[in-house]
Amino acid sequence: MKYFFSIILTLSFSISFSQKFDKTINQLISQHEKEVIELRHWFHENAELSNREFKTSERIAEELTKIGLKPQTGIAKTGVVAVLKGGMPGPVVALRADIDGLPVKERSNLPWASKMKGIYNGEEVPVMHACGHDTHTAILLGVAKVLYKIKDQIPGTVKFIFQPAEEGAPAGEEGGAELMVKEGVLKNPDVDVIFGLHVWSQINVGQIQVRPSGIMAAVDEFRIDIEGVQTHGSTPWTGTDPIVTASQIVNSLQTIVSRNMPLTRAAAVVTVGSIHGGVRSNIIPENLYMLGTIRTLDSEMRKTVLKRLEEIVSNVSKANNAKSKITYLVSYPITFNDPELYNKMLPSLERAIGQQNVNFMDAVTGAEDFSYFQEKVPGLYFFIGGTKIGEDPKLAAPHHTPDFYVDDSSMLTGLKSMTTLTLDYLTNNK
């Protein structure tokens, strides 16, 4: 009985402690909201490509220094990390924002539209924040500003991780969350849990969508090279045709999902999106290559897809007397929300923005390298709405497109949710 009352008292203290902070946090967020929006505009206007976020990381470090923190720069090439030590001992929470843009030309009349250029695959390209990473960066800086104001009352430590190259490092380079983990970003101090968010253009502002377990797919980008024997198109029997071989491989790959996957367990996708080979109608080429992507939401299903891919490519090539080689270009694990952490923190999200505004979602087949952090420590990843209230989110431009846009009012949800998650975890696990 004594133990029972001890638990009740502990829970009551934790709840009252968290609720005491709510009013203070909301006041501080209101004070900083305009500043955070202005930062968002600056990052948007100065978008930079993966591993080339030089101005971006410089501005992040400058803002962290203004707050009173001591940022570390050059992490995983252009990443920035800062640590906020609370006034009392406790766990370590990491908060992550991705900072890179995309090779997309912005098609908007915003006064802060990007006119930036960068080099992608050896060519000069326009650069735009076509996936909302500008909002993620500004939100995390806002959270740092708010938490610093109450640092003496925080029981634990907060590590702010500004990650480059989420969209993928340039060819031949390492980058992103995988490199950050390799360089020890989750160590010194050792991180207990990590939280991350993604603004989504096709959800209304003020809404959060989240789920336990797999929320975003593992991705495996692949290249298949096929080598045949070149010959005249009028005498195909004198050569080995890589085009016919490739056609048979593409058709056979479609049977992986339709005939080998237990689709009642989770979704899976195998797509060949590009084939390059041949120069004219009457020449059977010597070789060609194909590019494709695999998306899976279950680790065992992922293993099966990769195994079947290799079997099909090898066997079809042999049947056509051709040679083949598979190269994996990019691989991210499943973005997996730890179920226990999800159950613990769902009430915090609901309290931050209202229970009616937090919704369960289906998993999506997009991918996120936040998954590398979640392989090492329990993590929670969620989506916040970006379409202005009163507008139909179904009509919003998708991510990675020239017309992509999320409203400034989305920042408030991000600020409230990330600060509440952080303080509640630290308070309830000290």
Image (cartoon, grey):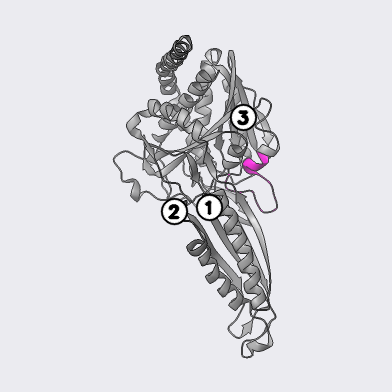
Q: Which residue is drawn at 34% across and 49% down?
A: 394
| Magenta highlight on residue 178 | yes
Give the image quarter of residue 5.
Answer: top left
Q: Helix, strand or loop at disc 3?
A: helix
Instruction: Pinpoint residue 30: horizontal percent, then vertical percent.
Output: 41, 22
Question: Residue 75, labelled with which disc?
Answer: none
Q: Is the N terminus in the top left, top right, bottom left or bottom right quadrant?
A: top left
Mark 3 or mark 1: which comes first in sequence?
3
Identify the residue at the far bottom of this view. Answer: 234
Q: Give the range drawn in magenta.
A: 166-180
Of marks 3 and 1, the one in the foreground = 1
Near mark 1 (Cα within 10 A), the count class, few <14, some 14-19 or many ≥20, is many
- In the image, residue 92 lies at what x, y percent? 59, 24
Q: Give the class, few, some or many, for how many residues have Cα within 10 Å of label 3's Cα (few <14, many ≥20).
A: many
* Marker disc for residue 264: 2
Q: Which residue has dot 3 on it?
A: 61
Task: Between residue 176 and residue 218, name the one nearer to us.
Answer: 218
Reading the image, the residue beneath label 1 is 296
